[in-house]
Amino acid sequence: MPEAPTVTILDGGMGRQLSRMGAPFRLPEWSALALIEAPQFVREAHAAFIHAGAQIITTNSYGLAPSRIGEGRFTQDGRRLADLSGRLARAAAASAATRVWVAGSLPPVFESYRPELFDVDRAPAILDVLVAGLAPHVDHWLIETQSSTAEAAVAIAAASRSGLPIWLSYTLRDEAGRLGPPELRSGETVERAVAFAIEHRVQAVLFNCSQPEVMDAAVRAALAVLVAGGSLDLRVGVYANAFVPEPLSDEPYAGISALRDDLTPDAYLEWASLWVRSGATIIGGCCGIGPEHITALRDRFR
Amino acid sequence: MSTQPTTPLRQPLVAVAQLNKWYGTAHVLRNVSLDVAAHERVIVCGPSGSGKSTLLRCLNGLELHDSGRIVIEGTELTRTASALSVVRREVGMVFQSFNLFPHMTVLENCTLAPIRVRKLAQGEAKELAMTYLARVQLSAHAHKYPSELSGGEQQRVAIARALCMTPKVMLFDEPTSALDPEMIKEVLDIIIGLADTGMTMICVTHEMGFARRAADRIVFMDRGEIVEQGTPDQIFDSPSTDRLKVFLSRILHGQ
């Protein structure tokens, strides 16, 4: 049998973990609410993922956008909250028994999953606030849940000024019953999106916040682009969510998505093993994937 | 050059032994063994679903085998990062889809990985790229973008780009299947030209005329196993198995 692969383990979904721990949690603030009202929960959630086996934890800065915490609060407090999310993650990492890295989350700064709502003119100022607040505390960036390369380009430009390594993660179309080639939510092909990542010199390209079912095809497509282009130093990763599949829709994101009950830690591990076999070397979880899933990943891959 | 199909003259560059792979319960590679000598040109053919592309993808770790061994120039291919990077450096691959970087010129497409991965200086990488762009007869297009090129030209750029990593062996996975008919020949001619320079290559294709011209050896796969292999004359003129005879009659007579 071939030897075991080298896999780096990320953490799981922060928002649902905060909710499970009893932290204040509701729309529109989502995971930012705990940061604002009860930051000790954020620290504890990081600790839970580290205890579970995460080698990299991600700052709880996904909710830090004007659309989620309000224009006024973002203007007044955005940088302080970004700084706080970086400090909390760094403190949790520093008190771990093993080396834990901190990834600075740069979220979609308008709506998740809605590439058509991306505003190229307004995005840089929002991202600059997050980068300024987080940069002193993080080891690298994790530009997450990107629906289009246009959106990613602006985030990469903002993150580049820090000089820290950049990991870029795309979210994929995953409507119920989906067949066909892997695509970003913008409709761009994964091949195109990975070529973009190579061009922009990111260090890892990942796929997140989509159903596990669509991830393997994306990993395979990504590896093919990397191999064809000779860019063999770029890593590929996956952190899927546990949302119940929904029909494709142009409607805005209406509430808090239901979580499916079939993604047990063992079931998620089977998916993760598939991605690793296809060439992914960074594995974690997104919304609804908790510490127990991360432990299953650790036990298999480390 | 030609080598006896089953007894390569020297240590094989690519050694595949007793390879097995399953997708769930489907046994997609069955005890596949294949040695390829340096400078040998091997063409793999067979019906769709025969495992030929899967075999090719196993050779540079794009697919992981379940049992058996793959050794490329003395390095066994395992899933460890170090083995993968060693093997992938030695193995160039060209796919059906060209996967060029759309916002980079042809020249930038060719120099990106040598600069980034092989750590060549800009000038050195550019010189290398121009050498290989000349070999695929696209020197004049070096400063164009992929969208300004035909499909055949884009595939030729993809070949030049792979060569810029100076691989020891080139894998071609149906390199002309995504092309319009009038562009197939220009790409096959480039591959034949490359073969004439002594490049070791393994090519999966349905282009039987090309196979006859270019191959030292043809490997016929069906249902996950190597059924028959031999020189083009042996394969085309005196196939010994019914499965190969059926395949040839279908593909040569378009049935």
Image (cartoon, coloured by chain):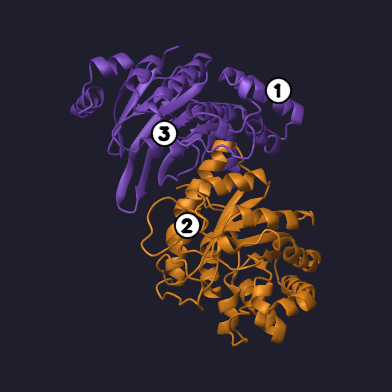
Chain colours: A orange, B purple
Identify the image quadrant of residue A107. bottom right
Relative to A99, residue B72 above or below? above
Rendered location of residue B227, percent (x, y): 27, 30
Q: Which mark is in front, 3 or 1?
A: 3
SS assignment at label 2? helix
For the residues marked 1 and 2, what is the alpha-carbon distance in whole angstroms? 39 Å
- Which amino acid, mark 1? Glu
Task: For the residues labelled 2 and 3, say whether their Cβ atoms are less than 8 Å apart.
Answer: no
- Say whether disc 3 or disc 1 marks the residue closer to the N-terminus: 1
What kind of residue is marked 2?
Met
Residue A64 in sight here: no
Q: Which residue is mark 3?
A: B178
Identify the residue under disc 1: B127
Amino acid at pointer 3: Ala
Residue at which label 2 appears: A215
| Crowd band around label 2 with a 10 angstrom C-alpha radius: few (<14), some (14–19), many (20+) | many
In the figure, residue B239 lies in which quadrant? Answer: top left
Q: Assess whether mark 1 and mark 3 are in contact (beta carbons under 8 angstroms).
A: no
* Chain of the residue under label 1: B
**Residue at 62% across, 53% down:** A150
Query: Dot 1 surroundings within 10 Å: few (below 14), some, or many (20 or more)?
Result: some
The reply, left or right, for residue B87 in relation to residue A104 is left
